[in-house]
Amino acid sequence: MKQRDNKADRFWDWIARRYDRQVHRDENYTQAVERIAKYLDPGDTVLDYACGPGVVALKIAADVTEVHAIDTSERMIEIGKQRARESEVANVHFAQKTIFDDSLRRESYDVVLAFNILHLLEDARPAVQRASELLKPGGLMISSTPCVAEAGVLLRMLLSLVSRVLPLSHLWKFSTADVEDLILHEGLEILESEAPERTLPIFRVVARKR
Ligand SMILES: C[S@@+](CC[C@H](N)C(=O)[O-])C[C@H]1O[C@@H](n2cnc3c(N)ncnc32)[C@H](O)[C@@H]1O
């Protein structure tokens, strides 16, 4: 994917190794994957949108037929491929591409994962629309989104400053209502949602394409 070389991609390339080390130590990932396991079937083809270093994709690999793990950061994809080789996982296919890439076929996925991405996008609506388009009828979109608008005041102030410096412009104002609105606007049906009380609430939603 050579056409993109924007500030956000360079930021994620730069932070990829550190991010990978940090999420591998983060128990929330193990819990998040445990929570979604009940929605996965052995026959499923899954799209992991904005997969980062592939922590979730590699964790669910044994529960499904195939995972297509996509991200716009070259470094994140390299790390994901390396980890797949090291752990001898053959059914996770990493690729540097956006969700709008023509190679992704409409109505071909049983599950689309969108973990820690919606709040980072300039405009998340087209991405959710595309995710819905890629899902088979009855397929699931499972998202997990930090909702900074509902975080404590100090953290919000800090992230508001951070988002002026880093290419994360909307990060600090994203709310659970924004996520619900994005999903319902696409006509997806929310099956389950939760936003555990934490310093930074992470809003988890399982939604079905009708
Ligand atoms: C916070 S990380 C989340 C990674 C992974 N989903 C996880 O939960 O660990 C955000 C990821 O989104 C990717 N990203 C940012 N904008 C993107 C876009 N427009 N399309 C695809 N990936 C994007 C970044 O490269 C980065 O790897």
Image (cartoon, helix red, strand yellow):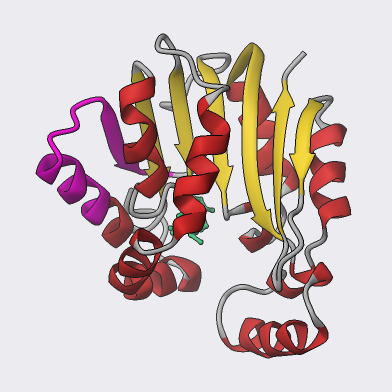
Quarter of the figure with residue 110: top right
Q: Position of residue 104 (x, y in %)?
A: 46, 26
86 displayed left or right of 181: left
In-front residue for pair 11/2:
11
Whether residue 69 is situated above or below residue 1 in the rendered picture: above
* Residue 171 occupies quadrant: bottom right
The residue that appears at 65% across and 81% down in the rendered structure is 163
Q: Which residues are magenta?
A: 78-97
Above/below status of 153 relative to 34: below
Q: Which corner quadrant of the image does residue 145 belong to? A: bottom right
Looking at the image, which residue is at 82% across and 54% down?
176
Query: In the visual, does 146 lie left or right of 156?
Result: left
Q: Is residue 81 magenta?
A: yes
Across and down, in percent, residue 120 comes to 62, 62
Question: From this viewpoint, is residue 188 visible?
Answer: yes
Identify the image quadrant of the C terminus: top right
Name the foreground residue: 31 vs 60: 31
Residue 100 visible within the image: no
Q: How many marks?
A: 0
| Magenta run includes residue 181 | no
The x, y position of residue 91, in whole percent, is: 25, 25
Residue under the point 22% across and 54% down: 78
- 57 on left or right of 148: left
Q: Position of residue 34 (x, y in %)?
A: 50, 37
Q: Residue at x 32, y 53 (%)?
A: 2
